[in-house]
Image (spheres, rainbow, N blue to C red):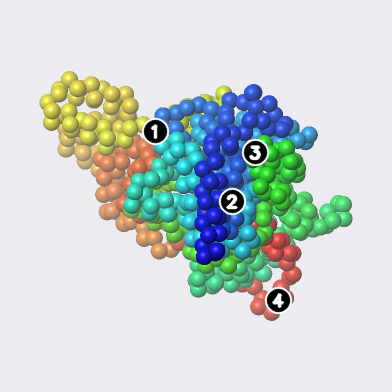
Amino acid sequence: MRKGFFGLVTLCSALATVLTQTVEDYKVTSLPGIDLDTLNFTQYAGHIELSEINGSTMFFWMIEREVKTEPEKLIIWLNGGPGCSSMDGLFLENGPFRVNKDLSLSVNQGGWQNYATNVYVDQPVGTGFSFANTDSYMQTMEQTTEQFILFLDKLFELFPDLIKQDMYIAGESYAGTYIPYFTTKILELNKQKQKYNLQGIAIGNGWISAEHQYNAYYDFSIANNLISPDRIPLVSTNLKKCQEEVKKKNLIHIKPCEKILSDVIDSSTHDGEDGEKKCLNIYDIRLKEETSPYCGSTWPYELTEVTNYLRQSDVKKAIHAEKQTLGWKECTSLVYSALDNDQSKPSYELLPGILKKIPILLFSGEFDLICNYLGTEYLIGNMTWNGGRGFSKKTKTEDWKIDNELVGYYKQERNLTYVLIKDGSHMVPYDKPIECLDMINRFMNVGSDIVKGKKSIVGNRETIVTPPKDDEKEEDKKEDKEEGKEEGKEEGKEEDKEEDKESQAAQQDDEWSQYYSWGTTTLVFVILFAIALCCCWCRGKKPSGSALDQFGGAPQREREDLKKPGLLTTIQNLFKSNKTNAARKFRLGDNDESNELDELVIETPTLFEAEDGDSDQEEIPTNQYRNQPERIN
C-alpha cells in the first residue's frame, strides 16, 4: 500500500514538473560574451525530461530563423560519436556563434538560421549536457531511436508551432547511422497517422556503411600516399581479413576491420621536431603533425575555447543547463561504450526505403579520412533505389561555383543528391561555412542565387527554387485541351517556351523530322552509323586515369560483369535518345529504369587489388588510438 502511495506521489510530482515548464522558461534572455540585442534571432535552451524513473534528460538549444519562409523550415541537427555533443555543430560548424580566445562570442556568417529554425540536440542521453543514470545509457539503435522520438514528441508539445513546419534532420559522422534509423521510424509512424512533417534528411561525411568505408580506408590512403610502401602488404592483408568478416555478418561496425585505420595511423606516426611522436589528423589529412596517439581528437583547435566557454557557471545558467552538474564534455566515452556491442544492421540498408518517400542529401569533404568521400561514393554506386542502381550514366556531375570559383560538385537523381566539397574536412561546415549554407538552402529550396553577397551557380542553374516538372506542365496542357480553353492553352504553351526553351526546341526538331526526304534520312543514317562505330571503338578501350579525376580520387577499375552493348543496340539507343532524352535536366524526382552505372560505381567496393602479404610477416604494433573511444567519428 505504501509502495503504491509513493508511486502515485512520484507520478504526480513528474506531472507537476511537466505542467510547470513553459516556453518562457526555456527562453535565453542573456548570453555571456555577446549582446543579444545585436542579434536577429531568438533562442531557447534547456533540458526536457524523458523519464522520472531513470533520470534521463535531454538537452537542446534552439535558434529561431531570421527570415520567415512559407512554409517555415525546421532543422534538427545531430553530431556523431556516438556520444559527441551537438554543441560542436552550434559553436564550431553551422551554428550562429564562434568562441574567441577571450571567450567572447562572434557571429558566424555561415549560420544555418537564415531561413530555418535550428534545434541542436545532445543525444543519446549522457551526451554533452544530456544526462541519465549510467545504467540507463542506450545499447542499441532501436533504443536510441525510441528515445529520440520521445524527445521529439515532447519538444513539439512544448513548441506546438514546430510540428507544422517543414522538418529536416541533418547531421554528420555517426549521425549517418542515427538519422536513417530515426527517419525510418518516423515514416512508419506517419503510416498510422500523419504526425511528423519530415521533408528530407542531410548527412555529411556519414558513417552509413561500414563495408564500403573500410574498403575506402585502403583505397583513399593509397591514393593520398598515407601508407608507406613497406606497410602496404600488411594493410592489404588486414583488409582481406576485414572483407571476410563482413561476409560473415555486416553490422554498423566490425571490430576486426578497425585495424585498417590503425594501420594507416601507425604508418603516419613519426618523430616530430619537438621530440614527440606525431601523426596525421584522421579528420583532415592535410594536418600531419598532430600529437600521437590523439591524431586529431583534439581538433578543431578552437575546441579548447568552446569547452571553457560552456563550462562557465553563468553560461550554464543562461541556457538553463544547471541540472547537469558534471560539466560539459565534447564526447562521452560511456555513451560510446554502451553502444559498442550493438548488433544492429548498417543504416545503409535503410536508405532505399527512405528515398521512396523523401529526398536525401549526402555531402562529403575532400580531405576527411575517417568517413571519407570514397566510402560515400562506393555506397551510392552499389545501392539500388527507385528503379536503378547507382547514378545512371546520363546523370552528369555539375560544377558548383561561388563567385565564379569552383567550390565543389553536385550530382542528383531519383531523390538523391550527392555533393563533394573541395578543401573540406570531416567537419565541412567548419571549413566551408558559406558553401554549406548555400548547399542546405538549395536542398530546402529557399533563398536565392546570392549567398552572403556572393553569386552561387550549380551547373547552369543560377536559381535555387526548383522549376516545375515537365510532367506537371503536360498535365496542365491536357486539362486545358479537355476543357476547350484555347486561349489558356496558348498561354500555357508560351509559358512553357519561356521556362524550357531547350526542351521545346527538341520537340520542334522531332515534329519537323517527319518531313525529311528519303535522301536526307539516308544521309543522317550514314552519319549515325559512323558515330556508332566510333563509340564502339572508344568503349572497347580499357579506361585509364582516375574514376574520380574530377574529385582527386583513386584510379578506377572497369566493371567486369557489365556487358557492353552491341553495334545494333548502340544505333537503336542513339535513335531513342533523339526522341526521349533531348535536353534532359536534373530533377530530384526523375526516375531511371536503365540500371546503368556511371564511373563512380564499382561492383566490388575496393578499387585496388589488395597485394599479397607475407603470412609469416610479424605484425607491426599499432598505437592505441582506437582504444580511446571518446571520439571515433
- In primary-sequence order, the first of circles 1 and 4 is 1
Q: Are marks 1 and 2 in contact (CB under 8 Å)?
A: no
Q: Is residue 268 above or below residue 465?
A: below
Residue pushed farthest bottom?
616
> Sequence order check: which comes first, mark 4 or mark 2?
2
Pointer 1 or 3: first along the chain: 3
Residue on which the image places disc 4? 617
Q: Which three-letter amino acid code belongs to the residue tagged 4? A: Gln
Looking at the rendered structure, the kind of residue marked 3 is Ile
Mark pair 3, 4: CA separation? 56 Å
CA gap, disc 1 and disc 2:
40 Å
Q: Amino acid at mark 1?
A: Thr
The disc, 3 or 4, on the residue closer to the chain's N-terminal end is 3
Q: Give left or right: position of 217 versus 474.
A: right
Secondary structure of the residue carrying numbered label 4: loop
Residue 264 figure quarter: bottom right
Name the front one of labels 1 and 4: 1
Query: Can you tell which of label 3 and label 4 is closer to the viewer?
Result: 3
Residue drawn at point x = 73 percent, y = 70 percent: 620
* Circle 2 residue: 57
Label 4 crowd (10 A; few <14 / some 14-19 / many >=20): few
Q: Which of the marked residues, 1 or 2, is nearer the chain's N terminus?
A: 2
